[in-house]
C-alpha cells in the first residue's frame, strides 16, 4: 500500500515551500508579533494569487477542484513557516463546513468568494473554557437570528463570515452568519501566540441561515477533517524546530566542541525526530482516510491530532533547551514555533479531549 504523495502533490509542496521561504521568513511573524497587524496581508495575498484558498473547493464554485491531500501538503508547509495568516480558519474550517453541509444556495453565495480570497471565513464553536459538546452549546438560533457569545474564535476579528455551532430548538445545528451584518460585536483577545488573532464575538439577534441537517455528527466531521490538517501543520512545525535545533547544535561550541557532539544533545535531537516521525505516520493515515472519506476517519483523525500535538510541543520545547539561554530571549526565533505549538495544541480541542474521543470511538467500534 502506497502512503506517499503523488509527484504533482510533491511539486505543489515544493512550490508552497519556495513561496513561503521567500515571502515568509521569520522576520514576518516577528513583525506581526511586534505590531498591531492581525495577520501578514502580503503573505495571504500571495497564497490567494496561487489559488491555494480554493484548493479543495469544486471548480463549479470557483475552486481548483483538488482534494484533501493537496490541502495536507499545503498545511505542512504553512506549519514549517509558522505563517501568520488566517488559512486554517478560512480553508480548513469555514470553506470545508460550507462545502460539506451548506445548501446549494449557500455554496453558490459563499464558496466562490472564499475560493478567490475575497473574504475570510471562520468557525465559531467554543463558548469559554469548557470543551464544547452536544449538551452544552448555549448560543441559540431561532426565527432566523443567532444570540450568544463565542470565545475564542480564531480570526474572529478579521473574518467576514462564520459558520456558527448553535442550539436550534434543542438540537445542535450549523448556521452561517455574515460577520459584517447587524447584531454583532467583537473584542480582540490576547493569546500566547499573537501572530494568530482570536476574538470574542457577541451575537445579538444577528441574522443567520441554518445549513443542511442538524446534529453533532456534522460538527464532529468538520473537526475531524480539521484535526488531520492541523496535524500536518504540527508535523511541519516539528520538523522546522528539529532543523533549527540541529543547525544550532552544529554551529555552537562549548568547551572547544560543537554542542551537537555531546550525547545529551544527540538524545534530544533523536527524541524529536522519533516523535516527529510517529506524528507523520499518523497524519499520513489520517490524510488517506480524509481523502477517501474512509470509515476509520474518526479514529485516524483523533490519532493524528494526539501525535501531532505531542510531537510539535516536544520539538518546540527541546529546540528552546538546545539553544540554552539564548533561546529564551526576544531576539531568538525559537519562540515562534514554541508559541505556535502551544496554540495549535488547543485549536479544535486539547489533546486530552481527543484522547477521550479516541477511546470512546474505539470502544463504540469494538462493541458494534
Image: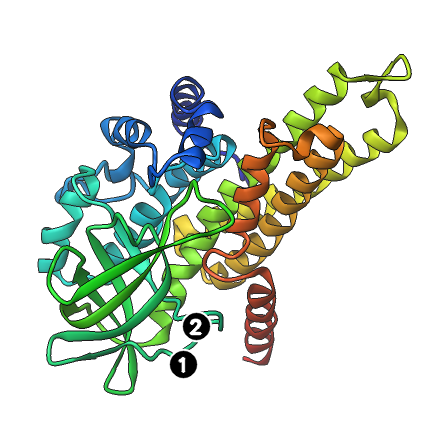
* Residue 231 percent coordinates (x, y): 52, 47
Hey, which quadrant is residue 60 in on the image? top left
104 sits to left or right of 190: left
The residue that mark 2 highlights is: 132
Secondary structure of the residue carrying tag 1 is: loop
Coordinates of residue 203 in the picture (x, y in percent): 22, 69
Give the number of marks: 2
Q: Which residue is mark 1?
A: 136
> Looking at the image, which residue is at 33% across and 80% down?
138
Relative to 200, say whether 41 is above or below: above
Q: Determine the residue positioned at 38% across, 63% down.
A: 221
- Label for residue 236? none
Q: Position of residue 116 (x, y in %)?
A: 18, 37
> Does the image show residue 346?
yes
Residue 187 x, y percent position in the rendering: 31, 58
SS category of the residue bearing label 2: loop
Contact, mark 2 vs mark 1 (Cβ under 8 Å): yes
Task: Locate the C terminus by quadrant.
Answer: bottom right
Measure how far apart labels 2 and 1 are at the Cα level.
Answer: 6 Å
The quarter of the image holding the N terminus is top right
Amino acid at each position: 500500500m502506497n502512503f506517499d504523495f503523488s509527484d504533482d502533490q510533491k511539486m505543489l509542496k515544493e512550490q508552497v515551500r519556495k513561496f513561503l521561504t521567500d515571502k515568509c521568513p521569520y522576520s514576518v511573524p516577528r513583525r506581526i508579533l511586534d505590531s498591531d497587524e492581525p495577520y501578514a496581508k502580503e503573505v495571504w495575498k500571495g497564497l490567494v494569487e496561487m489559488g491555494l484558498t480554493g484548493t479543495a473547493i469544486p471548480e463549479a464554485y470557483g475552486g481548483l477542484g483538488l482534494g484533501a491531500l493537496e490541502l495536507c501538503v499545503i498545511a505542512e508547509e504553512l506549519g514549517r513557516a509558522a505563517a501568520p495568516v488566517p488559512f486554517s480558519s478560512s480553508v480548513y474550517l469555514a470553506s470545508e463546513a460550507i462545502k460539506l453541509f451548506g445548501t446549494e444556495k449557500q455554496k453558490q453565495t459563499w464558496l466562490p468568494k472564499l475560493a478567490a480570497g475575497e473574504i475570510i471565513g471562520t468557525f465559531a464553536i467554543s463558548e469559554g473554557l469548557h470543551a464544547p459538546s452536544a449538551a452544552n452549546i448555549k448560543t441559540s438560533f431561532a426565527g432566523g437570528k443567532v444570540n450568544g457569545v463565542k470565545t475564542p474564535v480564531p480570526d474572529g476579528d478579521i473574518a467576514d463570515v462564520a459558520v456558527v455551532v448553535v442550539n436550534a430548538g434543542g438540537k445542535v445545528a450549523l448556521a452561517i452568519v455574515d460577520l459584517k451584518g447587524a447584531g454583532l460585536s467583537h473584542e480582540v483577545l490576547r493569546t500566547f501566540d499573537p501572530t494568530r488573532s482570536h476574538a470574542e464575538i457577541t451575537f445579538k439577534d444577528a441574522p443567520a441561515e441554518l445549513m443542511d441537517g442538524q446534529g453533532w455528527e456534522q460538527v464532529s466531521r468538520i473537526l475531524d477533517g480539521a484535526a488531520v490538517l492541523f496535524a500536518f501543520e504540527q508535523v511541519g512545525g516539528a520538523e522546522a524546530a528539529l532543523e533549527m535545533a540541529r543547525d544550532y547544535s552544529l554551529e555552537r561550541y562549548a568547551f572547544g566542541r560543537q554542542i551537537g557532539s555531546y550525547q545529551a544533545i544527540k538524545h534530544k535531537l533523536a527524541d524529536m525526530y522519533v516523535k516527529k516521525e510517529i506524528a507523520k505516520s499518523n497524519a499520513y493515515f489520517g490524510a488517506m482516510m480524509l481523502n477517501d472519506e474512509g470509515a476509520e476517519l474518526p479514529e485516524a483523525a483523533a490519532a493524528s491530532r494526539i501525535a501531532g500535538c505531542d510531537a510539535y510541543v516536544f520539538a518546540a520545547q527541546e529546540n528552546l533547551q538546545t539553544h540554552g539561554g539564548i533561546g529564551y530571549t526576544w531576539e531568538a526565533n525559537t519562540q515562534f514555533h514554541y508559541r505556535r505549538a502551544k496554540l495549535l495544541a488547543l485549536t479544535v480541542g486539547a489533546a486530552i479531549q481527543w484522547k477521550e474521543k479516541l477511546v470512546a470511538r474505539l470502544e463504540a467500534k469494538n462493541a458494534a
